Amino acid sequence: MRWRVSTLRWVSLTVAFVILTFGGWVHRCWLGQFLPTLSCKYVLWTRAGDCYLWHIQRVLQNADFDELLPELMFFFLLILLLGKSWCGWICPFGFCMDLLDAFRRRLRMGYVTFSDALNRQLAWIKWVMLFIMLVVPLLCIEGCVLSEYRRDLNVPFCQLCPARYITPLFNDMWNQLAVSFRSGASVLMTVLGLAITGLFLVGALVKRRFWCQFCPMGLIVGLCRKLSLLKLKKDCDACTRCGICNTVCPMDIKEVHLERKRSDVTHQDCILCMRCIEYCPEDHALRATFCGKTIYEASQKGFFARERSRPSDTLEKSVDATTASSSGNDHAK
Amino acid sequence: MSYFAGIDSGSTYIKVAVIDNEAVLGHKVARTGIVCSNTAQTLLDELLADLHLSLSGLSSIIATGYGRRAIGFANGTISEIAAHAHGSVMTTPEKVNTQTIIDIGGQDCKVIILGANREVKDFTMNDKCAAGTGRFMEVMAETLVTTTEALGDLAAQATDPCEINSLCVVFAQSEVISLLAQGKSRENIIAGLHNSLAKRVAKMARKNGLARDVIMTGGGALNTGLRAALEQELMTDVHKAKYAQFNGAIGAAVHARQMGA
Amino acid sequence: MPNELVEEQKKRKARFGWALEQVTRRLLDDLSVEDHIPKRMDYFLNILRQAFVPSAAGEGPKTELYPGRKVIGTYCVMTPEELIYAAGAVPVRLCGGSHEAAAAGDEFVPRDICPVVRSAVGATAFDLLPIYRRCDAVVVPTTCDSKRKLGELLADFTKVWMLEVPHIKEAERSRLQWLEQIYAIKNSLEKLTGKKIGSKELRSATRRIAQAQYQARRLHTLRKADMPVVFGKHAMLAMNAYAFAEVDEWTAAMTAFNDEIEGRLMAGQRAGHTQAPRLLLAGSPAIFPNWKLPQLIEEMGGVIVADESCVADRYLYDPVGTTEGTMTEMMRALAARLIMPCTCPSFSPNEDRLYRLRYLVKEFKISGVIYHVLKGCLIYDFEVGRVEKLMKELSVPVLRVETDYNPEDIEQLRTRIEAFVEMTRVRAKSER
């Protein structure tokens, strides 16, 4: 059966979203609280797994390190296993953004790309997010600088994260979408959080996967990409540097297109959506590998088969002729 | 005993050679004339008569040179480059391991680099203009009221070779005349011409990386002065091939022999 | 706004035109009866016949080519044909290959510049080929010096849209500027044709061209086969014919052509001798009717299995890659495909070309490279050293052949090429 990778990915995202957001309806369906994806805790009882960032912040704030090590192990194990495909194939917030993107395409709207200079300037934001996530809770430990704000700065990153405001909506929970007037700090954090959420909702409509270049979870998973079992590899000899991979990449990654020597081109920002492989017109130039084995590879026939999916009047004959002699398809193995 | 013939149908001269399994038996040269095929036929017949052989006694005849395709009675053709490479098998002097062949013919000059098995590894040709060819020396010899054969000896008597700047035959001729007017001696001018030609050829030779040993073929090899100038320029010995002028024809015959083998 | 020719120019036009017709007619006739020519070659020969030998088509000089439509002349591969088709117009590649036209062009441009441009000038100025004057506008990319000045000159004869191709394509600002220019061409086309180019039209045009590109790639792949079944002089000519054909027709003809080639492969019908060396024709493009080199090389016993000519193998190689039918992405993808994978030496640095040549040598199992340099083609000549160095690494011999459209040096070329073919054949045999 012919499956396009993009269709496969939609299926995966939908299934993951359903399980993670509504899995709680199924008795004992629990995947763990150390998931390397924005599967938000604030979806409350219907969820089937937690984004680990919430727990890390709690652990750091309470200086409660007993469970830390085994949980961290599982966390990194999951990262190593699936690498950045957590972002592209599982993340519920990613799914939300992809829905918005699909809506944009339906409206036949174009999209925005940032210049290299701007991207460089914005790169520090995800490190700030990471900082907020790791350092602020540490500073809130009893006896430290910010300890009096413990309550207000509880899980500081989660107060800013747009996933926390959006994903509960799918469960008809609107109570997160509110400014907390408990204290000055709370007001600040929740207003910021709501502002960020609004920004990224609109942003996802004009720029593909807008949040992902700022996401600290993506940052952490990305930092582990060299050790991950799932990688993006390139055959630099087969590559013609046509730049199609750069055009179709939702993260606007240039390095895959420009790389000339190394074969491992898994980038920090990459969400492993594999659109680059899907749209690359040169056999074997790009491929996804799991444990070194190729699971999906660029194909010239696949590229042109896609271009033929809607034959025009004068082309019936040549279409049939070429379809007959090609067995091209681009399904994932 | 098998006999093979090679015909080098050049633009000015036709050369023929006959070889057997071991040695070069004979060779002849004549001006090409208008119908090279006829000239070649006549020349070959004369040579065979001298050697007491008949046309039917030849196992094979191979033609080379510009007019090779017009030689209807030949059994095949090869390019001059290949012919010269083959020829070096029989024309290399003793104790010389030929890696580079410099051929200065009537209207072109070539540098052929040989590989380990005497096959052609690389080559450079100048056949676009007469610079560096026998024609150059012919014109100059005429201008200086002498013959091409005498040039070598005259150059040996030079005391202070002139600098000739023009590579082009036509302009070099003008330069020679003005040098004569300045009172420069014929010997010095000829030596200067040899240097100029040698520079031109050396440039071609060095382009592919000069590989020793170097042999010289073609009419130009008979000019001792030119050979000396080339040695000077290339800073290596330049050996004169045996039967230098007939290297192409001999090479064609060698090819005939190899084909028959 | 064509210049009207004065009386004495008309006489010269008649002479040049007659010579051009004779030469191309003879060439096409020779090609038609050649050994091992694919039966499906007819269509491509006819296209060229119609373009070059108007009276041979039996109708006298064509009075109106493409009635009712706009014709856009193009130069180089960096012109966006997708946009031209989307606007309902027809693109025609005008890079010149005629010696007679080049001789005519000598009156207007220096003799030392490349014959491609001289030929185009001659054909336009003297109205030697109807298609040149028929164009409603021409797109001239500023690739090399000659092309750039050509654009300036052609403005005397026709409407010219210059496309400033960035020479340094790596820089982001170059790409942005290039994208702007593509938009500008789009606007010019819309204004000229009176038709709006929407995303649907553009998508449909990209699809149509993609079909042609697929067939071109099929041919490319078929030529890789261990046993060569089609001569380069035929394959390259079929690609060259695209310059004067409309895409859908060409695609259908090429499909049939490829099918025939595939058939030959199955049946084991070799082209050339068993020991014919597999050659790569690199360097300046050989453009019809300057078919001197492809014919000579294969006459001397080689087979051209690969080339990097922008009117042959590279003409239809790079597709537009777009995930969505939005104008933004398609224009971006179009702008990228026109320059990013392009290995024309007008770009500096031109690393991409070395990679492509390495790929060609490996995939096509090349045993010799013939590097064609047109007299006056500075940029290709400049890169000879680099290519020679690369080929040395790959142990492949290179023959630099400098020539122009003049047939006078055929004998000298013949000697060189024959020697080279012999040399590569012996090398290939000893390596086996």
Image: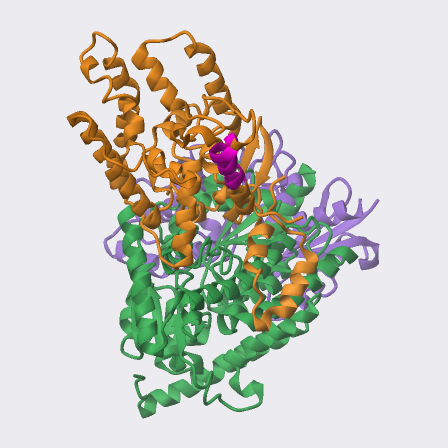
Chain colours: A orange, B purple, C green
Q: How many marks?
A: 0
| Residue C267 visible in rendering | yes
Residue A315 position, x and y percent, is: 60, 69
Query: Which residue does the image show at 43% across and 70% down from the upper left?
Result: C86
Query: For this view, does C189 lie left or right of residue A124?
Result: right
Q: Is residue B260 above or below residue B13?
A: above
Describe residue A211's horizontal placement relative to residue B32 as left or right: left
**Can residue C230 be spotted in the picture?**
no
Q: C392 or B114, which is in the foreground?
A: C392
Tell me, yes or no, whether the highlighted magenta stretch contains residue B75: no
- Furthest residue toward left: A184
Q: Residue at the location (34% across, 80% down)?
A: C125
Asked whether, in this view, residue A295 is left or right of residue C73, the answer is right
Q: Quadrant of residue B8?
A: bottom right
- Is the residue C55 above or below the residue A86 in the image? below
Q: Position of residue C28 (x, y in %)?
A: 59, 75
Q: Nearer the viewer, residue C114 or A323?
A: A323
- In which quadrant will I find the C terminus of chain C? top right
- Name the image quarter holding residue A217: top left
Main SS, magenta region, reads: helix
Vertical order, A34 against C164 (above or below) = above
Please state, as top left, top right, bottom left or bottom right, where the N terminus of chain C lies in the image: bottom left
A19 magenta-colored: yes
Between A15 and C64, the one nearer to me in the picture:
A15
Asked if residue C355 is positioned above or below residue A23 in the image, the reply reads below
Q: Which region is colored magenta?
A: A12-24
